[in-house]
Amino acid sequence: MAFASGGYYGINRSITQADIDESTATFHGELTGKDYTSEAAMRDAEKKEAMRRAVPTAEELAFENMPIDQLRGVLERVNRSTEEKAELHLLSRTADAFKELYPFYNDSDHNAAHMLYALQQRLGANYTRATIADFEAAYNSLNEAGLITFNKGAHAAAAKEEAQRVAAKARDEQFNEKDAYTLSLDELRRRSGGTSGGRW
């Protein structure tokens, strides 16, 4: 009775012709030339056919037939090469940080070659793992030997700034009796060199 009163019959009645067409739809594979009932089945068959048709290159065949010991050596070289690239990238970033900290350093091929040589002498094969401290040590040793050229613009600007700072300090510390009355006792002691002569 429930079927006739619209319960079950009503559910079946909601299926449309489009649903029926979709469930019987076929998918045509271009490589296989066959029709499939689902898109997933067609993709799988097409993929297998494409792989079957692929002709391996001489390098691929040689790689497939390579003895395991030789294959291990190839993979180790590839891994080592990847690690070296990462270490060289780290060295480059450390060098950039060093150049930011030392504006006097002239970023030239001449200086770079000397710095690289000094880092290799200092760290050996681990030169790619150099730290800022390693760069500073190499820079100082090359500077003492007179092998580094300087960024003249930055060097002149820093020298001028240092001269201005020294002059300002000298002006501040020059004794002026009028200003001395406004200074604190601690500042007077500092300017006098910290000696009180027993009178403070």
Image (tube, rainbow, N blue to C red):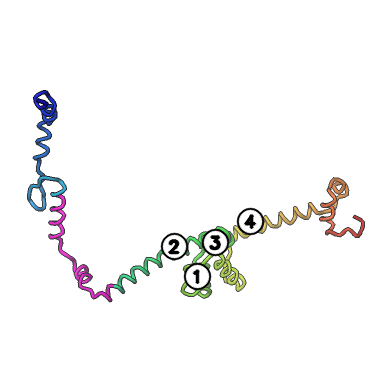
**Mark 2 vs mark 4: which is more N-terminal?**
2
Residue 141 shown left or right of residue 60 in the figure: right
Q: Secondary structure at mark 2?
A: helix
Name the amino acid, label 1.
Leu
- Residue marked by disc 2: 89
| Residue at which label 1 appears | 116
First in sequence: mark 3 or mark 4? 3
Query: Closer to the camera, 45 or 29?
Result: 45
Contact flag, marks 2 and 3 (Cβ < 8 Å): no
Q: Residues within 10 Å of mark 4 (few under 14, many from 20)?
A: few
Q: Which residue is mark 3?
A: 98
Amino acid type assigned to the residue bearing label 3 in the image: Phe
Which residue is label 4 attached to?
157
Q: How many marks?
A: 4
Which residue does the image show at 55% across and 64% down from the upper left?
A: 132
Q: Is residue 136 above or below residue 157?
A: below
SS majority, magenta: helix
Type of amino acid under label 4: Ala
How far is disc 2 from disc 1 in space, using C-alphas? 14 Å
Q: Nearer the viewer, mark 2 or mark 4?
A: 2
User: Going from the N terminus, do you reach mark 1 or mark 4 first?
Assistant: 1
Q: Is residue 118 above or below residue 54?
A: below
Specify which label sits upstream in the sequence, 1 or 3.
3
Q: Is residue 133 above or below residue 45?
A: below
Classed neighbour count for the residue bearing mark 3: other residues with Cα under 10 Å, few (<14), some (14–19), many (≥20):
some
Relative to 116, is 28 on the left or the right? left
